[in-house]
Image (cartoon, grey):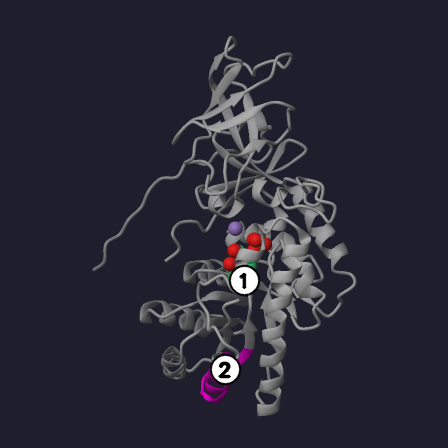
Amino acid sequence: SGLTASRSVRVPASVGDPLSAVETPALVCDLDKAETNIRHFEDTMRDFPSVRLRPHFKSHKSVDLCKVQLQSPLVSGFCCQKTSEAEAMAEAGINDILLTNEVVVERKINRLLGLLQRHETLRLAVLVDDPSEASKLSSFAAHAQVELGVLVELDCGGGRCGVTSVQECVSLAQTLHALPALRFRGIQAYHGTAQHLRTPQERKAAIDSVLLTLREVRSRLSELGVPCAEITGGGTGTYLHEAASGVYTEVQAGSFRFNDVDYGANQDAHGVQLSDSEWQFSLSVLSTVMSRNERQRKCVTDAGMKAHSVDSGPPRLLHAVEGAEVRNGGDEHLIITYPEGIAVPQLGSQVSVVPGHCDPTVNMHDFLVATRQGVVVGVFPLARGPGF
Ligand code: PLP
Ligand code: MN
């Protein structure tokens, strides 16, 4: 007998509602803009026809949005970061999943193997960065009578997970290739800390240095006769460098569907902030004015830091107002100050803000309210939580 838990979750809107009827604070995605971002992504990838897109589920945690993106001819499958995310996708019928993390706890490994047992067409892989885990995964997969895909994770300089040398990478790849019940598929080389380097020159230099390592790994593996079919990595900030490398076979960008203030602060080659010129701000948090002070030229809305993540700084107004200032007011409050000549929003009126960082913001909400031209067209449940 285990503990059971349940909670009632209030749905913020119904299909057909105007935005004004949506309960706030709510997470809102303008689907037209998200689709514009997906099309722009495809346009930028035209020059690299052999490079596929494996978008990351962690950014939106919505199987409904996966289905929107599956319409893209470039999409081969999806990435996710957590066992629970893999379960949400597999149960929704998505049959090509790369879990971009090491999974070492036996219960979790068995949950993943269970997915392979239950979904016959599922192609599933996880990352490995330790030889002792390799043999453990192999014996578990053999026992479950399924084949689990594995990729070696290479630390690209972020200092997070991953092997840290050519030698370790090659030797772990050899080990994985030799083990029964595992299919060695290749290398993950995702450079997280390069994504928000502000200039394209800095971002390119960071990826160039990873390419030196990857080329060496690739040629050593080919000398050893170890097939390395996949080299995967690349986020919204750098994916064009990976795509142009001739080394990466797929890119994992995710945030570009939404954009956020942090990505909007990246610069183009002329030092101009990209803001929403490269990617549309399709994601926003809808909030309601609960207090205002005309003399101080400010209003306070209900989008505090429990409704959007502040690790990358405060949100900005979706509809930019020159001279307006947005300030964190604590857990449940957002303070917005307007310049002279601009009306301070009335009590009860709604204000949309773009979060500093899209991924952790999404994780705070039970639902994503999908809209087109200000009308709710879907209320998508999110596979959110710490993700066990
Ligand atoms: N791949 C991995 C392994 C990641 O951790 C992330 C995000 O942090 C991504 C891809 C997607 O990057 P982004 O959402 O910045 O495009
Ligand atoms: Mn992120």
User: For the residue labelled by badge 2, is the local secondary structure a helix, a strand or a loop?
Assistant: helix
**In the image, is 44 to the left or to the right of 177?**
right
| Of callouts 2 and 1, the N-terminal one | 1
Residue 174 within the segment the image draws in magenta = yes
Residue in the foreground of this view, choosing between 375 and 135: 135
For the residue pair 374 and 138, the one nearer the viewer reads as: 138
Residue pictured at 73% horizontal, 50% vertical? 40
In the rendered image, residue 269, in percent from the top left (x then y), is placed at: 73, 49
Classify mark 2 as within 8 Å of ligand 1 or not, answering yes or no.
no
Of all residues, the one furthest to the left in this rendering is 1
Quarter of the C terminus within the rendering: bottom left
Q: Residue at x 50, y 38 (%)?
A: 313
Residue hosting label 2? 167
- From the viewer's perspective, is residue 282 above or below residue 110? above
Q: Is the shortest distance between ligand 1 and the CB of mark 1 under 8 Å?
A: yes
Q: Given the current orientation, which residue lies at the most extreme top position?
A: 295
Is 196 contained in the magenta span? Answer: no
Q: Residue tagged by mark 1?
A: 79
Location of the N terminus by quadrant is bottom left
The residue segment tinted magenta is: 169-185
Q: Position of residue 45 (x, y in %)?
A: 74, 60
| Residue in the picture at 72% in, 66% down | 244
- Distance of label 2 from label 1 (alpha carbons): 26 Å
Picture coordinates of residue 157, whole percent (x, y): 51, 64
174, above or below 261, in the image: below
The total number of labels drawn is: 2
